[in-house]
Amino acid sequence: MAGPSVSVDLSAAMQTVPVQLADWLVVAPSILTIVGGMLCLMSRKNIALAPKLGLFFLGLLVISNLLLLAEVLKRGVITMVMGNWLPPFGIAFTVDALGATLALVAAIVAFAAGLYASITIDNSGRRYGFYPFLLLLMTGVNGAFLTGDVFNLYVWFEVLLISSYGLLVLGNDRIQLDGTVKYGILNLIGTNLFLIATGLLYGQLGTLNMADITMKVQESGVSGPLMTIAVLYFLAFTMKAAAFPVNFWLPSSYHTPRIVVAAVFAGLLTKVGIYALLRILVMLMPAARAELADVIAWVAALTMLTGVIGALAQSDVRRLLGYLVISGIGSMLAGIAMGSVLALSGTVFYAVHSILVMTALYMAAGLMAAMAGSYDLRRLGGLYGASPVLAGVFLVLALAVAGLPPFSGFWPKVMLVDAALTLGWNWLAASILVTGFLTSLAVGRVWIYAFWRGGPEGTVDGGSVSLPGGGVLLAGAGGQSTAAVWVPIGILTALIVLFGLQPEWMMEVSSRGASGLIDPVGYLRSVFGGGA
Amino acid sequence: MRSVIFRTFAPFITALMVLFSIFVLLRGHNEPGGGFIGGLVGASALAIYGISAGVGPARRALKAHPMSIAAFGLLLAAVSGVLSLFTGQAFMTSQWAAVEVFGVTVDLSTPLFFDIGVYLVVVGAIGSIALALEERESD
């Protein structure tokens, strides 16, 4: 040991107080998913074991994130700094109500997807490593929601991107490689911008810890370089979130992978971009966000409207749903543009709703295609006769995504429109409402074509074709029960109905998350102790 | 590429390189070196053996699939950070233990196991890519 023998007062730089066991919940999602993913990867030749192992760890993840959210709601913001270094030197994981809520919803969606995949992903997909990729994707997603360090956020973005490439090419079709290349190139540019902005930010402020940045920006006020950095971050994260006009990668890639992969992506990936915008623009650089408010509002409105118009023009159900993901991102951006507590709560609630509903819609679309043999609206039809339950579930999801009561999409839209009218952004409120109307047309069209009419295009009025019942045609089902397909859709739909009928709890949590962004005293105190 | 000279010497070179990669790995704690660079040297050893003896024999000599080696490495690295759970410290806090082996004090630590994890990840990942590329070429 040839270290220098100068005596240093370690108490200034090192943590000396013992860490509580509950604090470990902050890092548990990352550890659980890495350990689970690696065990899956080591045993990937054993295809019968893969779903069990994957679901076991995804289940643990849900439980761990549930405990984490309960702990955060009880104690406020929780921080753990790696390796006992005090912030801003150590890498901090700082979890507030916003991060914990999104992490929990993401874990539920991942568990549902794991269950759905246990039937719909065939043996070659399992051998190729679906479950390791899914678990590593969750490492990235959870890490991004929970970290309190900007560079660390970049690292988690990379982790989730790399695993998403793996999931996208699962199957190695020509069209999948094509979609992956488009997805990959635009995301590479986006993450590079993110990295450049982070480098500039470090050069400007000399720190990467989010709490530390918040304080330093408050002291120095908004300056030219900071404004540039904010714009770079805005561009990078809107690329990730698929906002207009940098969203063309999403419709050209989300219809190519296995349907369960598309479901997870549609649910989670764009929302990580929204979360990063909330964290960096709203909390770290509030003054820059206020300067950019008009730009963000225009981007939001255009994203909403181009998204939903794109959805109206599509005849492939998966492409249509991809455009609806984009349209939802517009509504979330509208909340960020307004920046009041109510508007931001609306954004958080909308993010939770969108994660649940988009995943469920893709899963339902997968079932529709399994029954009718196609994703093409012209060739779908007569599904009501084949499965009235699916017709009902799809109707619930369609109403939810269009923002109609009594489902989860209604309340965040109410909050956003209310906030817009209070702040005098009447045109933004109008575009949210118009988008909602057009969305109901787009999904209503799917429901009428796929479920209501008797059969595919060309069937005579009043006639009907008989389709095989649910699940018979599911690839690779091999005599297994199809319950594993219905349970995840059931869980997600139940949550959507629950949040629609009992929105108070979710409103309360999202408003706690939003006020923590606008006034991050709790966040700063958690990282730096009582002095901040 | 597969000349007699190369085929004769490749096993020795491979053995030396693996030995050297472990030396670099262990040296890395206090001096230049470490898991990443050691892993690169180890992966090159694999690549050389693959070129000289063919990919099949190289895979057989390795016993485990390179991807499984990489997975075990990441697992080891993650678990080495968890040990501090039992001492009431934060994730990734280093733990030290001095062990007496034949009259020499050896400092065992969690950073060492983390570094071994990095070494295995690099050997596994790069080795996996190298062997896959060599396989293509011989087709």
Image (cartoon, grey):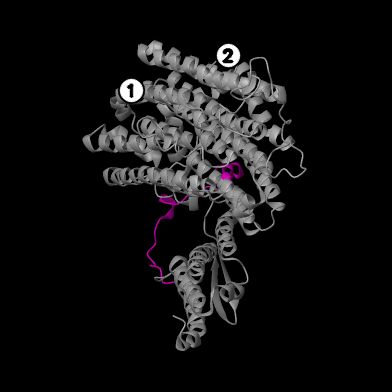
Q: In this picture, which residue range is highlighted in magenta?
A: A1-29
Question: x and y percent of residue A512 in the render?
Answer: 50, 25
Q: Earlier in the sequence, mark 2 or mark 1?
A: 1
Chain under disc 1: A
Return the residue nearer the eye: A213 or A54: A54
Q: Main secondary structure of the magenta part?
A: loop
**In what element is the residue under mark 2?**
loop
Amino acid tagged 2: Pro
Question: x and y percent of residue A154 in the render?
Answer: 41, 45
Question: Image quadrant of residue B40?
Answer: bottom left
A440 to B138, vertically: above or below: above
Residue A408 showing in the rendered view: no
Tell me the residue at 36%/13% (across/down): A427
Return the residue nearer the eye: A279 or B31: A279
**In what element is the residue under mark 1?**
helix
Q: Is residue A222 left or right of residue A388?
A: left
Question: x and y percent of residue B38 in the render?
Answer: 46, 70
Tell me the residue at 32%/24% (across/down): A293
Q: Is residue A116 left or right of residue A478?
A: left
Q: Is residue A13 magenta?
A: yes
Amino acid tagged 1: Trp
Q: Is residue A103 magenta?
A: no
Q: Is residue B27 left or right of residue A103?
A: left
Return the residue nearer the eye: A470 or A153: A470
Question: Image quadrant of residue A497?
Answer: top right
Question: x and y percent of residue B116 in the render?
Answer: 53, 66
- Disc 2 target residue: A405
